[in-house]
Image (cartoon, rainbow, N blue to C red):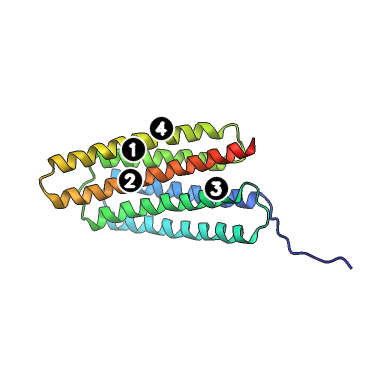
Amino acid sequence: MALKLPRLIPKEEKFFNLLESSAKNLKEGAEALRDLVHNYTDVEKKVRHIKEIESKGDTIIHEIIDKLNKTFITPIDREDIHILASELDDVLDAIEGISSRLLNFRIRKPTPECIRLVDIVYEAVQQIEKAISNLQDFDNLPRFCIEINRLENEADEISQEMVGQLLDQEPDWRVAIKWKEIYGRLETAADHCENIANAIESVVVKSV
């Protein structure tokens, strides 16, 4: 009698679909943060909505990691899947942290530089969502990564410039500390976007 073995190899699209769901949820979070800073009303309600998106993201990531632990053979390198999932989670965590600080620090109005940094993170997340949705199209992935890297460099320049200005020009040290923390979180979000681009580039290299 033939021995029935458990199915250890799921359909490849399961991992791709889960990563795509995570990326789309991340994009929703970035859109919500962008709406918050551009339309700075009902802040508490909007921050609560971002927290709900972040919680949904955690559920998706846990499902990816759970399947990863139970799967013998993966469609792309196991480590790359883990890095992509972790970094997608980190970007969304940073977005939630930014929104919470805007609320908890009682920021009356986002600065133009804060709005620009949020826009940059949103633009990077858009590129991430496109790349993850086309993760099996190796030929087109590099162009998304190049744009993400460019956006991260722009975010670094703005963040570093603003922190320098705060230290030199802001008379209220409490205000300076609040904005330094927010700018730092925005830079961190952009850095994690770049980490995703690096992981995607790793997928491309290993496919050759």
Q: SS of the residue at dot 1?
A: helix
Quadrant assignment for the N terminus: bottom right
The image shows residue 140, relative to residue 174, as above or below, that is above
In the image, farthest residue toward the right:
1
Q: Are marks 2 and 1 in contact (CB under 8 Å)?
A: yes
Label 1 CA crowd tier, 10 Å (few <14, some 14–19, many 20+):
many
Which mark is on residue 186? 2
> Residue 58, how many percent across, how many down?
47, 59
Q: Which residue type carries mark 1?
A: Ala
Query: Is residue 68 among the parts visible in the rendering?
Result: yes
Q: Which residue type carries mark 2?
A: Leu
Query: Is residue 35 among the parts visible in the rendering?
Result: no
Residue depth check, mark 1 versus mark 3: number of the one nearer the observer: 1
Q: Which residue type carries mark 4?
A: Arg
Which quadrant of the structure image shows residue 154? top left
Nearest to N terminus: mark 2 or mark 1: 1
Nearest to N terminus: mark 1 or mark 3: 3
| Front-lying residue, 129 or 180 | 180
> Residue 161, how many percent across, how many down?
24, 36
Q: What's the residue at 27%, 39% (across, down)? A: 160
Q: SS of the residue at dot 4?
A: helix
Which residue has dot 4 on it?
A: 150
Q: Which residue type carries mark 3?
A: Glu
Which mark is on residue 20? 3
| Front-lying residue, 45 or 197 | 197
Quadrant assignment for the C terminus: top right
Q: SS of the residue at dot 2?
A: helix
Nearest to N terminus: mark 3 or mark 4: 3
| Front-lying residue, 161 or 179 | 161
The total number of labels drawn is: 4
Which residue has dot 1 on it?
A: 155
Label 2 CA crowd tier, 10 Å (few <14, some 14–19, many 20+):
many
